[in-house]
Amino acid sequence: MQNLKSKLALSLIFALIVFLALAFYADAPRLLAAFAAFDWRWLPLALLTTLINYLLRFARWHYYLGVIGVTQVSHRDSLLIFLSGFSLTMTPGKLGEVLKSFLLKSRFGTPVSYSASIVVAERLTDVLGMVILAAAGLALYPVGVGPLAFVLGATLALVLVAQQRALVERLIDLGARVPVVGSRFADLARNLYASVYLMLRAQPLLIAIALATAAWFGECVSFWFILIGIGEPATAWLLLQATFIYAAASLFGAASMLPGGLGATEGGMAFLLEQIVHVAREAAVAATLIVRLCTLWFAVLLGVLALLAFGVPRQITPE
């Protein structure tokens, strides 16, 4: 628990630095005026569609548990475990979400090396879902076509390689020959790959991508509500712009490997708002900070509450 507190404290310090940088960029007095002008009646709707995102991602998590044969987990425990992973969202690449595997191990004995593959599959399908959403605006805003194509190609290549069971098992066997760590690595890798292979088959993959796309569209809608709150017209065109900007900025933030994409996501979002929607700089920064409050920090809060409700486990080995 102490480790969790220290990680959260460091995240808050980093977030404060990002906030100060954005306030300087937007001119603090103008930014405060933009916050004052925001129509806060749109905030509950933004939070509601964010919750829809979490529920759809939970559905994917619980579905994945069934795919790998972990069927003894109740919906209540599964939900608490899933939400607890948000408590460590502020880790590079969201690697802290492996906490979910430790919680499964503590309560149900599922090997961490077996269930951690769910986090890998979640991240892969998140990326594919985000690319699908960003692609919706590429015809209108051909910004970053190259990087998006690279991300899509690399992700699909990884999925295709993972489906070549004989090849992957041969690579694991080669790794097992490495002195000292070889056999240990091979045992963990075989356990991890056994479940990865199950989740990246065609049917589970397509179901997970569909859930991921729908889930992240929920947060794009949250962003749309925030943009309406700063005074933009509530049009389908604005929704398309919001979807493209949110997805592209989120992918950029994820690629940066910064905790929670802090700094990279906010900077990309504010910049694209200025360039595409043509809002004033202070309004762009205000909208960015509000949507991150609804999507990032709301998740962290729910994660901490869920972890407290589930119970913090003692140190667990990953066998």
Image (cartoon, rainbow, N blue to C red):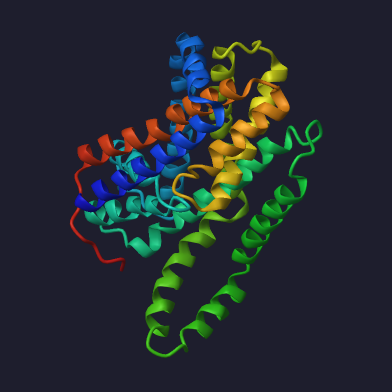
Tally of numbered discs: 0
Task: Report which quarter residue 12 is drawn in.
Answer: top left
73 left or right of 244 in image: left
Q: In the picture shown, does residue 34 fall above or below 246?
A: above
What residue is drawn where x is 45% and y is 58%?
117
- State the residue in front, 313 or 244: 244
Where residue 108 sits: x, y (%)?
Answer: 25, 53
Residue 256 vertical position relative to residue 280 in the rendered view, above or below: below
Residue at 42%, 38% (x, y): give it.
58
Horizontal and vertical percent position of residue 47: 44, 22
Name the side, left or right, on which 232 lies relative to 110: right
Residue 218 seen in the figure? no
Please name whichever residue, 286 or 72, is drawn nearer the observer in this view of the structure.
Answer: 286
Choose between 55 and 88: the one closer to the eye. Answer: 88
Q: Kindly identify the residue that appears in the image at 64 percent across and 66 percent down.
A: 161
Q: Is residue 118 visible?
A: yes
> Which of 128/247 is in front?
247
The C terminus sits in image quarter: bottom left
Whether residue 154 sits left or right of residue 72 in the image: it is right
Residue at 28% in and 40% down = 77
Position above or below: 24 against 34: below
In the displayed structure, does residue 276 sit left or right of residue 67?
Answer: right
The percent coordinates of residue 49 (x first, y second) are 49, 23
Q: In the rendering, at what x and y percent does residue 153 appear?
A: 71, 56
